[in-house]
Image: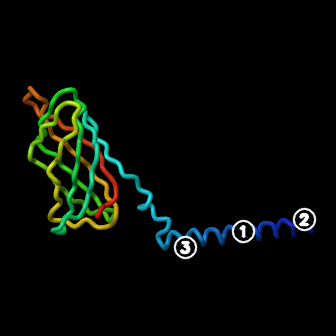
């Protein structure tokens, strides 16, 4: 009987300790200390011969979100972009689309000097983080056919 009592006391002691740890983790998660949004990495990747060098998504003075995106041409030839389309989805699942249709020539191996800021109008992005899809439509120098490259972008809104 003494072995059974020792085993029960052992299980009860560690059971209470595990219960206290779970309650502490639950309280931290409830108050936002363990929010996964805080640990979301910022990333921007584009396949098909382009690289995303830097980007910034911020709220402009008119109250709409604006994305500055700098891309690098790694195709081996100069390109003329037809458009850069971006669809963002905030943490609440709201989708918002913006585009830069100005046409931008990017020399081989060079970073775009500046893209026109892509403004997202007609929608209101909420939360502190975003994810999205980038689609670049471009023409290679000396060719007539259009090609596309796509990628993903994610990060935090900046002020």
Q: Residue at x 17, y 46 (%)?
A: 114
Contact, mark 3 vs mark 1 (Cβ under 8 Å): no
Q: Which mark is residue 139?
A: none
CA–CA distance in space, label 3 to label 2: 36 Å
The quadrant in which residue 103 appears is top left
What is the crowding at mark 3: few (fewer than 14 residues within 10 Å), some, or many (at least 20)? few
What residue did someone put label 3 on? Answer: 27
State the image coordinates of residue 41 (x, y, percent, origin top left): 40, 52
Mark 3 element type: helix
> Residue extending furthest right?
2
The correct choice, above or below, for 107 with respect to 15 in the image is above
What residue did someone put label 2 on? Answer: 3
Mark 2 element type: helix
Q: Earlier in the sequence, mark 3 or mark 1?
A: 1
User: How many dots with numbers?
Assistant: 3
CA–CA distance in space, label 3 to label 1: 18 Å
Q: Residue at x 30, y 50 (%)?
A: 153
The correct choice, above or below, for 140 with respect to 89 in the image is above
State the image coordinates of residue 85 (x, y, percent, origin top left): 18, 49
What residue did someone put label 1 on? Answer: 15
């Amino acid at each position: 009987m003494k072995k059974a009592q020792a085993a029960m006391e052992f299980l009860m002691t560690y059971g209470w300790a595990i219960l206290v740890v779970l309650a502490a983790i639950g309280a931290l998660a409830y108050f936002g200390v363990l929010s996964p949004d805080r640990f979301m990495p910022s990333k921007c990747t584009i396949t098909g011969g382009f690289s995303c060098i830097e980007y910034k998504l911020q709220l402009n003075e008119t109250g709409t979100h604006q994305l500055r995106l700098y891309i690098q041409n790694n195709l081996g030839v100069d390109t003329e972009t037809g458009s850069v389309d971006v669809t963002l989805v905030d943490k609440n699942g709201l989708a918002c689309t913006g585009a830069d249709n100005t046409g931008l020539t990017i020399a081989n191996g060079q970073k775009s000097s500046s893209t026109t800021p892509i403004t997202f109008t007609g929608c209101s992005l909420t939360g502190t983080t975003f994810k999205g899809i980038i689609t670049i439509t471009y023409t290679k120098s000396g060719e007539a056919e259009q090609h596309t490259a796509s990628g993903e972008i994610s990060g935090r809104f900046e002020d």
